[in-house]
Amino acid sequence: MPSSRAPNFLCITTYEKGQEFMRHCRREGCRVFLLTAEKLRDAAWPRESLDDVFYLPAGILLDDIVKAVTHFARTQKIDRIVALDEYDMETAATLREHLRIPGMGLTTMRYFRDKLAMRMRALDHGVRVPDFIPVFNHDDINFYLDHVPPPWVLKPRQEASAIGIKKLNSAEELWTTLGPLQDKQASFLLEQFVPGEVYHVDSIVSESEVVFANVSKYGEPPMNVAQGGGVFTTFTVARGSTEDGKLREINHDLIAALGLVRGVSHAEFIRAHSDSEFYFLECAARVGGAYINEMVEAATGVNLWREWARIEVAGGDGTYKLPATREEYAGVILSLARQEEPDTSAYNDPEIHLRIKKHHHAGLILRSTNQRRVQSLLESYAQRFAEEFLAVAPPREKPTA
């Protein structure tokens, strides 16, 4: 018999994020429990919205997490398990399957965590992807190297963003890179490097339908910024433009192919310089990082964390409705800063919507009814940020909290 009470949530994240998701679950009358990393014990969690917080020691095995949560479930009913970051998706999916709790299972989870799985699935459903090959059979790899011109990129299958990606220009360079990986080679894929402009589509999905999508374009490709240093920017594309319409169409087909039933997604695509076609890069079932949520909210009024919580609370009962939206424009500029608390007060255009406060980071969010104004300001600000604030750190091989 269906319960009339609000569902109980177990939120899992080993990174400091998702506070608004948890707050809104509490507003909906849910009990909310947080499972996070011990190193985040003193993080700014919304403790007033949490019934309890559990901390995972470093290096704990997944099997031990399953045992601990199963023990907790003896005295506290769990209705929803939600991974607030993609690195916790496997944990959440494993727990759902073990406890038979509705939601994304391990097979579908891999389409949003494993770059090889998502490419193969997308390609099978007619979504264009760069030429790629699994790093399994060496004869197949040699055939690929003979027929797909360099440069190529060697990508970890289960990392996020540009972490761990290596650009390679020759077969010799590839084999030299693969050798030290030994048995870990199969955890990578090899893909043709496609020069172009990178876009992202941030979506809300309810009962397998994309009910909201916002199309944006990065200033510099994120891989360039992550590996070469620089100023990160992204901005809403012109609504109703060819690129806006085409990416909405591709994104709709992609979400259907990957099988997301409810939640949010952040998908990235590249428009190749060579043929002006859009190619799928990756898709995560999470809210985009780098203040993309705040940018989307500035442009549309839609907070992705909040709507994700509303969808999870509804749980497929047909009650979820997207709130009223607006069609304005917004952008983000963000850089690592030499200063501990950089002063952005000299940036005083009326389009400035929010000043980002984060140690050793300089950042702004812009909002306007004029798309070209946002894009123009970001381009001029990026030059000034590079001179006034920019610091460059070595590329990350592993994620940091």
Image (tube, rainbow, N blue to C red):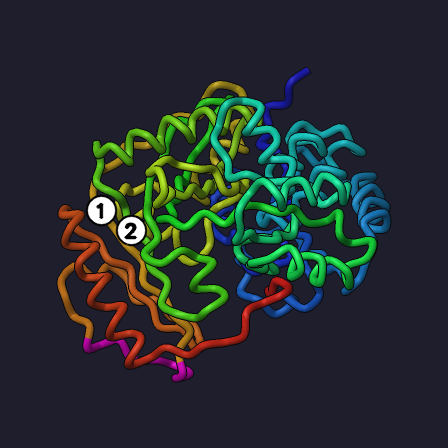
Q: Position of residue 114 (x, y in %)?
A: 65, 42
Residue 91 visible somewhere in the drawing: no
What is the secondary structure assignment of the residue under circle 1?
Answer: strand
User: Cβ–Cβ below 8 Å for labels 1 and 2?
Assistant: yes
Are there few (<14), some (14-19), or many (20+) residues within 10 Å of tag 2? many
Taking the magenta stretch, the answer to whether it contains residue 342 is yes
Name the quadrant containing residue 177: bottom right
Residue pushed farthest top?
Answer: 1
Residue under the point 21% across and 32% down: 240
Nearest the camera: 100 or 30? Answer: 100
Residue under the point 53% across and 57% down: 162
Nearest the camera: 18 or 147? Answer: 147
What is the span of residues highlighted in magenta in the rendered image?
A: 338-346
Taking the magenta stretch, the answer to whether it contains residue 92 is no
Q: CA distance from mark 1 to mark 2?
A: 7 Å
Residue 89 located left or right of residue 372: right
Q: Which residue is mark 1?
A: 329
- 261 lies above or below 53: above
Q: Position of residue 226 (x, y in %)?
A: 48, 64
Q: Return the disc, 1 or 2, that comes first in the chain's sequence.
A: 2
Residue 293 visible somewhere in the drawing: yes
Q: Position of residue 168 (x, y in %)?
A: 58, 58
Q: Position of residue 183 (x, y in %)?
A: 83, 53
Nearest the camera: 366 or 397? Answer: 397
Q: Which residue is mark 2?
A: 235
- 299 lies above or below 93: below
What is the secondary structure assignment of the residue under circle 2?
Answer: strand
Dot 1 amino acid type: Tyr
